[in-house]
């Protein structure tokens, strides 16, 4: 029994020694590296504080200002005054191009890229339309369809039918919106047909029939299927 008590006491003493060594080791580590540790902590505080300051006092006011300018340019866009919407919407406000340049990184600037691309498409400046639309990020919205559809339209106007087909495919496969997916599938099918790619055209038309029969394009899609079928 005495030996067992001595063993237990010895184990307890060893554990205490280990704890003391760990504490001393941690203390020594902090003393040796305290400048580095405090520097890292200070850096984190400054980084977090800087982010909060930027978000609340720089980015938020900038976003608000950009959105006000965007509204004025959109008014001209809705009047089909595309040149004015791009550069001079009036009232001293910035057009889409200035919003993109002055408010980069904001949601308003991203949206302005889309409007600028569509404006240039209407003005017949197809390369500019492609550039601005390509820089627009739909972020998973319904504008995924119209972005790629509009790029397809621009390439089609440039007679670059291969690129047009590629973008119509992206538009048609952007999701399951019945109206837009069927619309771009029909455009895709018609361009395939124009290019003599009969089997591809038929497949696009049949996808409308099978997946979107109640859409506007689905109402008379059988005649297009029959037409390309006769060519095959």
Image (cartoon, helix red, strand yellow):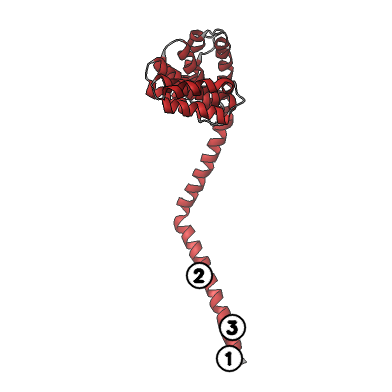
Mark yes or no: residue 138 visible.
Answer: no
Q: Which residue is mark 1?
A: 3
Nearer mark to the viewer, of 1 and 2: 1
Q: CA distance from mark 1 to mark 3?
A: 10 Å
Q: Earlier in the sequence, mark 1 or mark 2?
A: 1
Mark yes or no: residue 218 visible.
Answer: yes
Q: Earlier in the sequence, mark 1 or mark 3?
A: 1
Q: Which residue is mark 3?
A: 9
The tag on residue 21 is 2
Name the foreground residue: 171 vs 11.
Answer: 171
Q: Position of residue 28 (x, y in %)?
A: 47, 62
Q: Position of residue 190 (x, y in %)?
A: 46, 20
Residue at 44% x, 58% y: name it. 32
Vertical placement of 63 versus 98: above or below? Answer: below
Label 3: element kind: helix
Q: CA distance from mark 3 to mark 2?
A: 18 Å
Q: Earlier in the sequence, mark 3 or mark 2?
A: 3
């Amino acid at each position: 029994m005495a030996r067992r008590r001595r063993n237990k006491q010895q184990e307890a003493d060893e554990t205490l020694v280990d704890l003391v060594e760990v504490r001393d080791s941690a203390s020594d580590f902090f003393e040796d590296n305290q400048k580095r540790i405090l520097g890292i902590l200070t850096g984190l505080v400054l980084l977090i504080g800087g982010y909060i300051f930027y978000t609340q006092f720089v980015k938020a006011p900038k976003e608000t200002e950009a959105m006000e300018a965007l509204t004025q340019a959109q008014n001209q866009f809705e009047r089909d005054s595309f040149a004015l919407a791009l550069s001079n919407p009036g009232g001293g406000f910035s057009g889409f191009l200035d919003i993109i340049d002055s408010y980069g990184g904001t949601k308003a600037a991203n949206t302005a890229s889309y409007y600028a691309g569509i404006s240039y498409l209407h003005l017949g400046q197809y390369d500019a339309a492609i550039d601005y639309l390509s820089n627009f990020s739909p972020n998973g919205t319904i504008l995924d369809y119209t972005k790629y559809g509009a790029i397809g339209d621009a390439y089609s106007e440039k007679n670059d039918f291969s690129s047009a087909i590629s973008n119509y495919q992206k538009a048609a496969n952007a999701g399951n919106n019945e109206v837009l997916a069927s619309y771009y599938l029909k455009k895709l099918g018609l361009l395939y047909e124009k290019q003599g790619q009969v089997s591809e055209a038929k497949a696009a038309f049949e996808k409308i029939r099978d997946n979107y029969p109640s859409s506007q394009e689905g109402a008379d899609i059988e005649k297009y299927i029959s037409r390309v079928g006769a060519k095959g």
